[in-house]
Image (cartoon, grey):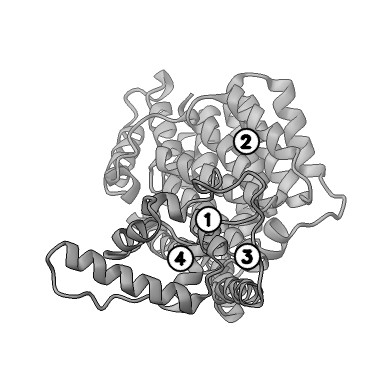
Amino acid sequence: MNARTLLQVLVQERGWTYDVFRRAYEKAAQEVSTAAGEPPSTATVEEQTFRRWTSGRVKGLPNQPAPQVLEHMFGYTARLLLDPPTELPRDAPANHVLALNESELAMTARDAAAHAGDAASLSVPDMTLDQLNDDVVALARGYNRTSPIEVYRRAKELLDIAQSLLERTQVPRQRTRGYLAAGQSAALLSAVCFDLGSLPAAVSLSRTAALYGQVIEHGPLQAYAHGALAFLAYWGGRPSESVRLVHTAQSFGGIGDTARKRLSVIEGRAYGHWGDRRAAECAVRRALEQNTGARDELHDDIGGEFGFPSDRVAMSNATTYLLMREAEGAETAAIGALRILSSRPEDQRPLLVSTQASVDLARARLLRGELDGAHEALEPVFSVPTEWRGAGTLERLAAVRSGLCHPDFVGAAEASTLGERIEEFSAAAAAHKLGAAAPLAIES
């Protein structure tokens, strides 16, 4: 039986057209109201509603008095009438064959047209998706020149828009674009939540981005999201999980050199925290030598926060060397990052990267016992506005503060002064006010 509802079976059995059904419905409505001692009913049913009831396109039950009227007409509950038939109606012969007439064929054609019309109406203008894409790209590219709080506000708005558009369209091409924009927005939200000091929120949003990427089988987005999860696992003090997530991220198709470079850097950091010096050094080399010419649309074509330019590679490698307590390698990498940044116009220098590289340089110099050099490296850091004092910077500074307690610096007035400035700087930071108090991996 190909009928979509029990109601359709019963209507076909009787050979009813819409007009016949309408008249029977109106009569039944009057009978129901009379039996209830109410004024005569004027209830009727439109053809579009009739087609929705018989074709199974009704969610829930229709408004009263329709359920009572339908039950009075056919002797079945409204729920059974509007559900797919599980058996032939009572008293129907076993060899029952549905009768077809021209009216039934016309009704089928109208049902099909109505369904197609409903589907066609569930779309959004392509220009709306174009604007959403442009806004996500602009935010990603301007991430390092926009305060974290403003990035959060914009990214949240873009995620809301993407989710709203996904509810309004059933066009596969548009849904793919909507899921991609939603995944990119969630990834940016994850990054800024980390900068603002909320590790749990950052983890949840990276998983969200990964799931959106999985829905549309978008390799670069899944790789980026899993890389972010690896980075967050490292900061959460779980280096073995971080390495596992990096290897998962590396398995996705369609990723280019920038993506692989970023993943190697994260892997190096994880191995450095794990204490595997040889593996960490191999990862650092892979990051520096990755140059096959392969590109992808997320890490390379959009870039910005999704990219991983040479200054970020150098800054991150400096941190890896610090984890291995190799002062010379850390100092060289940090100076390299700052040199690359200084070659750019001032309005194009990512403040978060330059700040973290400066703190890593100070920490490398402390490892060498150079208190004056550490103070010099930190001088530009202390002028960073409070909203730009992210979690990565604060945890690096916590490591510097810890290093100032080394016996070599006990009693040194400059060490005491520098420690006080670090405490004041951190206390005023936006990330500190949002609760970034738990020690992260960089302190190890």
Q: Given this view, does label 4 or label 2 mark the residue nearer the observer?
A: 4
The kind of residue tagged 4 is Ser
Q: Which residue matches tag 1?
A: 5
Which label was assigned to residue 75? none
Please tell me which of labels 4 and 3 falls first in the chain: 4
> Which of 206/217 is in front?
217
Please tell me which of labels 4 and 1 falls first in the chain: 1
Q: Is residue 262 visible?
A: yes
Q: Given this view, does label 4 or label 1 mark the residue nearer the observer?
A: 1
Q: Which residue matches tag 4?
A: 164
- Packing grade of label 1 (10 A; few <14, some 14-19, many >=20) is many
Q: Position of residue 129 (x, y in %)?
A: 58, 73
Using the numbered discs, state the Cα–Cα distance from disc 1 to disc 2 in whole angstroms: 72 Å
> Circles 4 and 2: CB distance less than 8 Å?
no
Please tell me which of labels 4 and 2 falls first in the chain: 4
Please tell me which of labels 2 and 3 falls first in the chain: 3
Q: Residue at x 56, y 38 (%)?
A: 229
Q: Position of residue 31 (x, y in %)?
A: 25, 67
Q: Which residue matches tag 3?
A: 177
Q: Which residue matches tag 2?
A: 330
